[in-house]
Image (cartoon, helix red, strand yellow):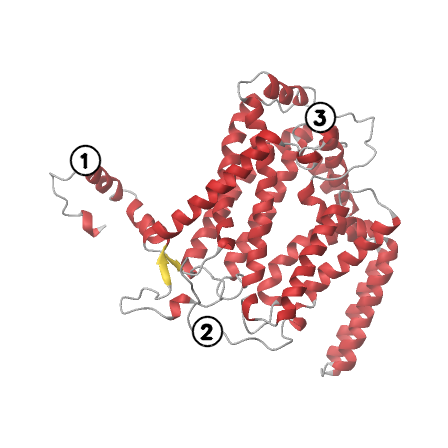
Amino acid sequence: MAEFHDISPNAPTSLRLLHWVDSRFPVSRLIREHMTQYYAPKNFNIWYVFGSLALVVLMIQIVTGIFLAMHYKPDATLAFASVEYIMRDVPWGWLIRYMHSTGASAFFVVMYLHIFRGLLYGSYRKPRELVWLLGCAIFLALMASAFMGYLLPWGQMSYWGAQVIVNLFSAIPLIGPDIALLIRGDFVVGDATLNRFFSFHIIAVPLALLGLVAAHVIALHEVGSNNPDGIEIKATPDAKGIPLDGLPFHPYYTVHDIFAVSVFLLVFFAVVFFAPEMGGYFLEYNNFIPADPFQTPLHIAPVWYFTPYYTLLRAVTTEMMLVLSAVVAAAAVWAILKINMPLLLKWVVASMALVAVALMHAIDAKFWGVVAMGGGVVILMGLPWLDRSPVKSIRYRPTWHQYLYAVFVINFLVMGYLGTQPVSVVSGRISQLGTLFYFGFFILMPWWSRLGTVKPVPGRVTFVAH
C-alpha cells in the first residue's frame, strides 16, 4: 500500500477512492497477489480451464438457487406444486429452474475433468498435497449438496432415491439405524427430511463450499500452479525472483479463461434451451410425477453423476465378499513370504488378515457395499502418498501408463452407465470386475507407478507459442 501513502489531492476520484479502500481493506494487494503478480506456468493447455469453469458454475448455482428459494415451499404437501408454479407461473422461472438443474450436471462434468487433469499431470504431488485434499473436500461437499438438492423437487425418483440412499446408513453396525433416523428426522423420508435437506442445501453446504474454494485457491497460489510438464517454475527465477517460465495470470490467463467460459456458456445454454432433460439423464422422467410413498418406481437409480459409485455399492454382494476374502488372504500370504520383515511383524500381518476376513463374513455385505461406495470417493485423498512414480506428468511416464489411465476412464464410464440400468447377471459380473479394477488401480499404485523406464524430464517447461 506504500504507493498510495503520498497520493496527491488532485488525483482522480477513482484513485482516491481506491486509496481510501486500500487503507482499510487490501484490495490492491489481493489483486496483485492473486492476479497481476501471480505467475502461472506459460505452458498451460486446455486442461487448465476447468478450475475457472467450476467457479463460474458455482456462481450460476448460487444465483439461480437464491431465486428458486424465493418461490419454493419446503413442505411435503406443497413442494412438487411449488416447482410446477416456478416452471409455469413465475416470470422466467422455467429458465432459472433449468439453469439450476443443468448447472448441477455441468458442475460434475467440470469437476470430473478437473480431477482427471490432476491425475494426468500429478497435480496432487508435493508440494500440492493440501491443495489436492481441499479439492477432494470440495468434491465431497458438492456431492452432499447435489444429493440434498435432488430430494427437493419431491418427485418419484427424488423421493425413492433419497429413501434408498438414506436407508443404506442403517447397514452400519450398532449406530446405523440411529444415523439414518438422524438424517431423515423421522422413521421415513418425509416433511422433516425435506426441511433439513432444504436448510443444508441452501445455507450450510454452500457456505462450506465457498470457504473450501477460497482455501483451495489460497493454498494453490501459495505453492504455485502445476503444469503439463510437472516442473516447478519457481526453481528457475530471474534476477528479480520472477519465474522465467511464468506469465502473470492477468491478463494472459484471464483472457484465456474468458474465451473458455464463453465457449462453455454457449454449450450450457444450448442444453438449457434445447435439451434440459438430456434424454432423462439430467432430469429423470419419473421426477415429473409427484412423490408417492405407496408406489415404488420399477427401477430406482440416482442421477447420472452418482451412478459410478452406486455401481460400486451394488457390486458388493455376499458372493463378492468371498472373492475379496481370497484377495486379502492371498495378499497377506504374499507379504509374509516375499517381504523381508521381522517374525513379529509377520504375525501382525497374519492376524490383521484373519480379522479382516472374519469381519467380511460377520458383517452383512450391504455394509461393505456402503463402505465401497464411500471409499470410491475417499480413496482419491490418498493419491499424494499412493503415487510413487519418479516423475509427475504423464508426458514423461512409460507409454503404457497412458493406456492404463485410458482403461481407468473407460471403466469409470462403464460403471456410470451400469448404475443407470436394472441389475442383471451380466451387468452384475461386469460391475464386480469394474469395482476390482477401480480399487486395484489405486491400492496397487505404489507398485505399478514405479514400474517401467521414465523419459528424461527437461529442466525448463516445454512451450510452443500459439
- In this rendering, the answer to whether 352 lies above or below 8 is below
Which residue is label 3 attached to?
Answer: 288
User: Considering only vertical position in the picture, is 346 above or below 37?
Assistant: below
Q: Residue at x 48, y 50 (%)?
A: 49
Label 2 or label 1, whichever comes before in sequence order: 1
Question: 53 left or right of 319?
Answer: left
Q: Is residue 175 visible?
A: no
**Can you give x and y, in whole percent of width and height, for residue 431 in the image?**
79, 53
Are the two marked residues, 3 and 2, in contact with CB atoms closer than 8 angstroms? no
Dot 3 amino acid type = Phe
Q: Amino acid at mark 1?
A: Thr
Disc 2 vs disc 1: which is toward the camera?
Answer: 2
> Quick one: quadrant of the C terminus?
bottom left
The residue at the far top in this view is 89
Residue at the disc numbered 2: 458
* Residue sitting at x 85%, y 62%: 323
| Residue 207 place in picture, x, y as percent | 51, 39
Instruction: From the viewer's side, name the closer residue of 465 and 6.
Output: 465
Q: Image check: 204 left or right of 196?
A: left
Tag nearer the camera, 3 or 2: 2
